[in-house]
Amino acid sequence: MTATYEAIKTYTATSNISSFSWTSIPNTYDDLVIVAYLKNSAGSNYECYTRFNNVSTGNLYTYTFVQNYQGNLQAGRNASINEIRQFKTSSGRFSAHEMNIMQYKNTNVYKHTVGRSGDVTMISAILGHGQFRSYSAITDITLVMEPGANIVTGSKFDLYGIKAE
């Protein structure tokens, strides 16, 4: 089986912003992929959170990760939180991020993500798994910067749909 990636929506920040959203995501794909190049306005180690369908309460997210942060291997789990915390950013350089969202339109399963992030300024690499404990199809995705920082001008966001053939 082959998979075809189709660009759904792209955006490049033309000013500093605290968040960015994709809305009215079509249900014509099997899975989704977010690719982002981010930099923040405040300093190292600020997170850019991912939320689905404007849900930011109720502790419906879980995030498990393994990371190498400045030469220290770390692992952890954040259960019952209000966002997926995959994307760590710095103000020094743009960092690269990718998140796969499996079965985003399936109303019979919780939604799962697998993400990869890297940042040479913080000498950081992260592999993580997220879960959104909702049976609702994902129609909106919001990336919001941790309080105290903004997403800077030039940050780029791409949303792709995957069709299995």
Image (cartoon, rainbow, N blue to C red):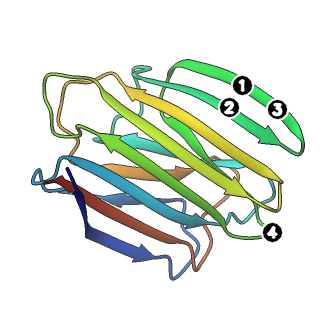
Residue name at image x 72 percent, y 66 percent: 41
Q: Is residue 45 visible?
A: no
Asked if labels 3 and 2 touch by Cβ distance under 8 angstroms, the answer is yes
- Which residue is label 2 attached to? 66
Name the residue that disc number 3 marks. 73
Label 4 and label 3: CA atoms lie apart by: 22 Å
Q: CA distance from mark 4 to mark 1?
A: 24 Å
Where residue 38 appears, as percent x and y from the top left, is: 60, 65
How many other residues sit within 10 Å of disc 1, few (<14), some (14-19) or many (≥20)?
few
Image marks 2 and 4: residues in contact by CB distance under 8 Å: no
User: Of helix, strand and loop, which one carries label 1?
Assistant: strand
Q: Are marks 1 and 3 in contact (CB under 8 Å)?
A: yes
Label 1 amino acid?
A: Ala
Residue 28 shows up from this direction: yes
Tag 4: residue type?
Gly
* Residue at left offset 41%, top offset 27%: 131
Q: Are marks 2 and 1 in contact (CB under 8 Å)?
A: yes
Pick whichever of labels 2 and 4 is earlier in the sequence: 2
Q: Earlier in the sequence, mark 2 or mark 3?
A: 2
Of labels 2 and 1, earlier in sequence is 2
Q: Measuring 59% from the left and 78% from the top, which residue is drawn there?
A: 153
- The residue pinned by badge 4 equals 92
- Outermost residue toward the right? 71
Dot 3: element: strand
Side (left or right) of 23 relative to 147: left
Q: Disc 2 versus disc 4: distance between alpha carbons? A: 23 Å
The residue where tag 1 is placed is 75
Task: Give the vertical position of 31 relative to 159 (above or below).
Answer: above
Classify residue 114 as left or right of residue 112. Answer: right
